[in-house]
Image (tube, rainbow, N blue to C red):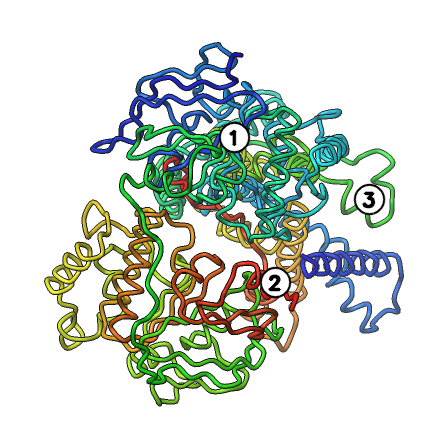
Amino acid sequence: MTPVLDIRGVSKYYPGVIANEDIDLTLHKGEILALLGENGAGKSTLMNIVYGLQQPDTGNIYINGKVVSLASPRDAIAHGIGMVHQHFQLVPDISVTENIMLGAESIRHGLLDRKKAAQRIKELSQRYGLDVDPAAIIEDLSVGERQRVEIVKTLYRDAEILILDEPSAVLTPQEVDGLFSIMQRLRELGKSMIFITHKLKEVMHIADRITVLRNGRVAGNAQPVTTSEKSLATLMVGREVDLTFEPAANVSGNLILNAQNVSALDDTGHLAVDSVSLQVCAGEIVGIAGVQGNGQSELVEVLTGLRRSHSGTVEIDGTDLTHQSPREFTERGESCHIPEDRHLHAMVADYSVADNLVLNTYRNAPFSHNGVVNRPAIRAQADSLVQAFDVRTPDINTPSGSLSGGNQQKMVVAREFSRPSKLLIAAQPTRGIDVGSIEFIHRRIVAKRDEGVAVLLISAELDEVLSLSDRILVMYKGRIVAEVVREEATREQLGLYMAGAK
Amino acid sequence: MNRMRRRSSLLTLLAIAFVVTAIWVNTTSFAEGSWQAQWLPLFFGVSALNFMLRAAVPLILGALCGILCERSGIVNIGIEGMMLTGAFAGFVAKVATNHWPLYASLSVSVVAAMAAGGLMGLLHALFSIRFRMDQIISGTVLIILAMGLTAYLYDRDAVAQGKFTAVAIPFLSDIPVIGEVLFTNPPITYIALILVAVVHVALFHTRWGLRTRAVGEHPGAADTMGVNVNAYRYMNTIIGGMLAGLAGGFLVLEAVGQFQEGMTAGRGFISLAAVIFGNWTPFGAMTASMLFGYTQALQNELLLAGVAGIPRQFVSMIPYVVTIIAVAGLVGRVRPPAASGKVYNKDGQQ
C-alpha cells in the first residue's frame, strides 16, 4: 500500500546547527505515528517543513506516492495536511466559527456565511466526537476546548493527515484521556496522524508505530508491542536513563517548613486553599500530588510570599514569615523556589542567561557594590553555573527566551540552587521538558535532599511524585485529603484520592 | 464583554436622547426672552448641529483610517500627516484644473487627495513592514514630512476657485430638522457617513474583514491558515491612507476652499482619540467624532453669542477638555488589537 505521507532524505540546516539531516519517515493511512524526541531533536522543524512553514534544503516529500512541493501552509492544506500547533493558533476575541472559517471562508452574496460554516462545524463535531460550540468566543474556552477547535479547523479543510505538535503538554490528565479517545475515533474513520511528544507513557498507549529523533537524525523506529519505555528513553537520549531514586537515608527530624491552617483565595476570590497544615523536615522530600487546579498553585504562592494568605501561619526554621514579601522568604527564610510557570514567575525571557542567573543574588556582593552591578562577577557566576548545570546555550549573553524549555528550566534550577538554602519548594519542576533534563533536575533535587535541605515537591505527574518523595500528600479541592509514606503508596490508591473518591 | 456591550447601549441611548431633544427644540417656539429661547438653540439649534457634522466629517474619515490600520496590526499615529498631504494634493490639483468645469475639477482633486494619502499610507507600510521601523517613529516621520513638504511647496499666490456646495436629497431633505442637518450637505459629507456603514459591514461581515481582524489580533493564526499577513497589512494601510487623504480633501475642497499651512490643526490626533473612544469600531468612532465635533460647535456658538460672565478662553477649552475626559475617563476598558504595532516574522513564533 502506498503511504499517505512519505518523507525521503529531508535535511535542514541553520547556521551552525543541523536541524534535520537525512530524515526518512513514513505514515500509512489510518495510523498514529508517534514522533518522539527530546526538545531540540528536530521534531518541530520537520513538521514545519511538512506544513510548508519552512523549506527543506534537500530531500523530497511524497503524498500518496506523488512528490509535492510545499512552499506555504496553503500548499500543505491543499494537499490535505492539517496541523494542530503546540501554541494554539486561534484569534482570542472572535468566535469558534470565525476562527475555523478563517482562510477558507464560506461566502454568500459577498458576505460571510456564518450559518453555513457553523452547520458544517456541528456536523464535523458530531461525526468525530468533538464537542465544540460554534458560537463560543475563544477566550472563554478551556485549553482542552481550544485544542478541539484546532482539530476541527483541520477537519474543516478536509485534512487527511493531522500533525499534532505536543498536544498533551498543555492538558490535564482527564483532558489527555479525552484527546486520546478523539484520536482513536479519527483513526477509525481513516485519518492518519503524526503525534509529536516526549512523553513515553503516552506513546506506548496510543501509537501504532514510533519514530525516534535524536540530534536531528532518525535514531530508530519501533512498535509499542515490541519495545519498552526504557529502551525508547535510551533511543531518545542516547544513553541509559534512570528515573528511580533511593529514599532518604537520614531525615534529621529538624522541622524546617511549618504551615498551620493556611487558607487562601484564588484570583477570582474563591477559597482555593482550605486550612492546610503541613510540615517538611530537613533531609526529606514531601510530594504533593493532585490534579492541577486543586489549590496547589495558590498554596505554593502562599508558602513563597507571592500570595497573601487569608488565615494561618507560615514558619521557616522557626522564623514566622506569614505575610512577608518573597524577598523575606528568600533571604530570611533561606528558601528557594522553582515556580510552576517558567515564563510568568521564573525568568525574564528578554534578559540574557547571565542576568537571569543572578536575579536572586544581584543585590549582594560580589554581584553589586554600592548599588552598581559588577559585570565581571556576574559573568564568572554565569559561566560556572552554565557549566555545572549543563545549560546548553550558545553563550551566556543569549536571551533566555530563545533557549529550549529544558535548558530554561535548568537555568532556573541553577539560579535557585546558587544560594545556600534550608528549604526548596519545587512546583512542577519538570513540566514540558525532555527526559534528559528531567533526569538531571531530579538528580539535583535528590542531591539537595541528601545535603539536608527540606524539599516540598508539587507535581501533577504522579510518577514524578512517586519516584522522588519520601512522604506523599494528596490535595483535592483545597484540602490535604491523604498522607501516605512512599513504601505504601500505589498509583491506584493515589489516583482515587486525587479524584476525590475517598 | 458584557461591560462593553452595556457601555455601547448607554452611548446609543444618549445619542437617541440628544436627537429627540434637538428635534423638540427646533420644532417648538419658545416665548420671546425666556431662558429657553436664549439657551436651547445655542445647544441644539440647527446651526449647532450643522457645525457639529462639518467638524465631525474629517474626524470620522481620519478615524476610519486609524481603524483600518490598527485592526490589521499597524499603529498609525501619522493620520495627521496623511490628512495634510491629502489636503495639499487636493489643493494643487484644484488650482491646476481651475479652468475645468467645476465638478470635473473638484472630482479630480478628490482623487488627487486620496492618491496622495494612499501614497503616505504606502510609505508608512514600507517603513513599518519592510524596514521594521518602530511604527510610532514612522508615524511621527510622516507628520513631520507632511508639514515640512507642504509648507515648502505651498505657493501663497495660488488660489483655488470654487468648492463643493450642499446637495439637497429629494424628499429626505424635507423632513424637519433631520432633513436640514443630515440630507442637505455637500458630497464628501455623505460619502463619509456612507463609508462608516461600508467599513462596518466590510470589517465584520466579509472575508477581507475577518482576515484583517485576524491579522491584527493573532497574525500566526492567519498565517498558518494560508493568509498573507503582510499583504493584508499593506492593503489596509494604503486604503486607510486614502481615507485620511479624503479627510484632507474635505478640508480644502468642501469646508474651506483654500489650503493653509498646517490646516489639519490636530484633527489627525483627535481622530486617533475617536478610534480609541469608539473601541476600534466604525460606528463607535463616528459617535466619538460627533461628540468631538459637537464640542467644537458648542465652542463656536457660545463665542458667537458672546456669553457674558465666562472668559472666552474657558469656552475655547471645551473641545480639548472633553477630548481628555472622554479618552482618559469615560473610555473605561477598551482593548486595542493585540498584535497592533508588532512586526510579524515567521521565525519569531515562539
- Tell me which numbered mark, 2 or 1, is placed earlier along the sequence: 1
Residue A305, position as x, y percentages in the image: 41, 77
Q: CA distance from mark 2 to mark 1?
A: 30 Å
Q: Nearer the viewer, residue A440 or A23?
A: A440
Q: Is residue A57 above or below residue A367?
A: above
Residue A496 is marked as: 2
SS at circle 3: helix
- The residue furthest front is A487
Q: Is residue A495 above or below residue A367?
A: above
Which of the two discs, 1 and 3, sits closer to the camera?
Answer: 1
**Residue shown at 49% from the left, 86% from the top:** A260
SS at circle 2: helix
Crowd tier of the residue under label 2, counting other residues whose Cα lies within 10 Å: few below 14, some 14–19, many 20 or above: few
Q: Are marks 1 and 3 in contact (CB under 8 Å)?
A: no
Residue that label 1 marks: A208
Residue B301, position as x, y percentages in the image: 67, 61
Name the residue type under label 1: Asp
Same-chain status of marks 3 and 2: no
Name the residue type under label 3: Gly
| Residue A8 in view here | yes
Same-chain status of marks 1 and 3: no
Q: Quadrant of residue B129?
A: top left
Quadrant of image for the N terminus of chain B: bottom right
Q: Is residue B235 above or below residue B39?
A: above
Same-chain status of marks 2 and 1: yes
Name the residue type under label 2: Leu
Quadrant of image for the C terminus of chain B: top left
Q: Nearer the viewer, residue B292 or A264?
A: A264
| Residue B117 in view here | no
Residue that label 3 marks: B179
